[in-house]
Amino acid sequence: MGLLIACDEAQPHLEEIIERGELRVLSRYGPTSYYVKGDKLAGFEFDLAQRFASHLNVRLKIIVPDNLGDMLDLIEQGKADIAAAGLTITPARKDVIRFGPVYQEVTQQLVYRNGNKKPKNITALHNGQLEVVATSSHVDQLKSHQQDVPELDWTENSELNSSGLLELVQLEMIDYTIADSNEIAANQSLFPELRVAFNISEPQALAWAMPLSEDGSLYNEIALFFEQMEDSGDLDRLIEKYYGHIRRFDYVDTRAIHRRILTHLPKYQTLFKHAAREFNFDWRLLAAISYQESHWDPKAVSSTGVKGLMMLTKATARQMNVGNREDPAQSIYAGAKYLASIRDRLPERISEQEKIWIALASYNIGLGHVEDARVLTQKNGKNPDLWPDIKVFLAKLSKKEWYSQTRYGYARGGEPVRYIENIRRYYDILLHQQQNSNSLDLTVDD
């Protein structure tokens, strides 16, 4: 790869990690890095770090510093093994810390609020308040622009991260901020009034950081790990897992769910929680499914005759012993029970998270068509137990060249793909409402 150091060099840093049985990783809270999802930990950077810890057969310890400046200082001083926080590689940072292989590229973008005048370029910001994360690569980029635009001015915030500043723009407490393109995409459904005015940088590389004094042993192992992740397709699947459902933004729909969280959800929240406990789901997932199905309208009826909060067919209602499909308690309980029955029929080897998406696709289009897609997935050398692989072939079931190879034939396979993308987006919004980010130091056992 051109990344590896001679294999006969000493490996004290890597050996130290393995001997202590713990990988110490600096990260930061946010939808692109590390957050609490229901009663579990999640996030793109967290998932990557967890996989690397498993690769080393050690525990993962996540440490969240107070701000980005502290994180960079701690990794520079060797107080942790890795900083995994979507860090941009910059010349200034390369002077004091060591970066691993590039795993993603982002673009810095200027963000303003919908309803306010859109600035055309960097020279049009003098009448507004621009605030950015202190010691971030965004500051470096602004300094480079300031050479051409001397009047360019901004405030550096050492208390909030990019998500926090994006929320200040949403609340009209500041006029502008700068964030990386992946962070804006991840926050768009949470803060629907945000808009991108223009890019302020070319695409920039993201990578994990290590102390500059690192002897090469950990670097080599990280390089090997990312090489394996890329060769296996696992890195692409992980990116799909965290970003696949947020590529399309529906402004009207996103505003609508934010309103209905206040006006409709409280009436049914207890029912969702009861069904979730009974069938081992996160209640917010059930609520997200119900919003996709009916927008939390118990009297909703489709053109095909399905009705109620969970949009049950007559056949499903009979199977689940539902007497009144418009009764919220019966509908929610039956919908959860039916979804659980599909999930529990799937092979045990499939992970619980993947079972959820496969079961939801089956809830929408039928288990037979989903099984057809899984067979096609396997025939074409992909993993029939991973939703990102399955959905590619599920979408092909509307084309004769593909559905002619299947048992159950034609299906509008693109519909369940969009259905799940919507549910994942609504689920993210609901999780954000109650996200708890008080814990700063967590150890995760394998």
Image (cartoon, rainbow, N blue to C red):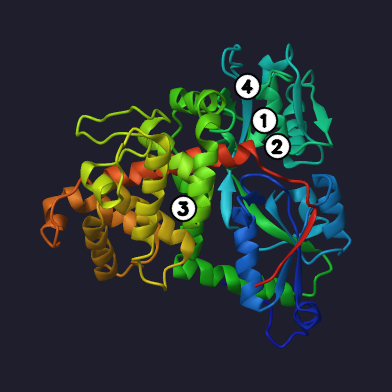
Q: Pinpoint residue 354: horizontal percent, then vertical percent.
A: 43, 60
Name the residue tied to disc 3. Answer: 240
Residue furthest right in the image: 77
The residue that appears at 46% across and 32% down in the rendered structure is: 249
Rate crowding at label 1 as few (under 14), some (14 to 19) or many (20 or more) other CA atoms within 10 Å.
many
Q: Pinpoint residue 265: horizontal percent, then vertical percent.
A: 52, 31
Closest to the observer: 104 or 191?
Answer: 191
The residue that appears at 69% across and 71% down in the rendered structure is: 445
The residue that appears at 68% across and 21% down in the rendered structure is: 171
> Tag 2 or tag 4, which sits nearer the N-term?
4
Name the residue tied to disc 1. Answer: 166
Distance between the alpha carbons at the discs numbered 3 and 1? 23 Å
Name the residue tied to disc 4. Answer: 112
> Tag 1 or tag 3, which sits nearer the N-term?
1
Tag 3: amino acid = Glu
Closest to the observer: 64 or 199?
Answer: 64
Where is residue 23, by image quadrant? bottom right
Rate crowding at label 4 as few (under 14), some (14 to 19) or many (20 or more) other CA atoms within 10 Å.
many
Name the residue tied to disc 2. Answer: 162
Tag 2: amino acid = Ser
Q: Pinpoint residue 55: horizontal percent, then vertical percent.
A: 61, 76
Distance between the alpha carbons at the discs numbered 1 and 4? 9 Å
> Quick check: marks 1 and 2 in contact, CB under 8 Å?
yes
> Tag 4 or tag 3, which sits nearer the N-term?
4
Where is residue 248, by image quadrant? top left
Rate crowding at label 2 as few (under 14), some (14 to 19) or many (20 or more) other CA atoms within 10 Å.
many
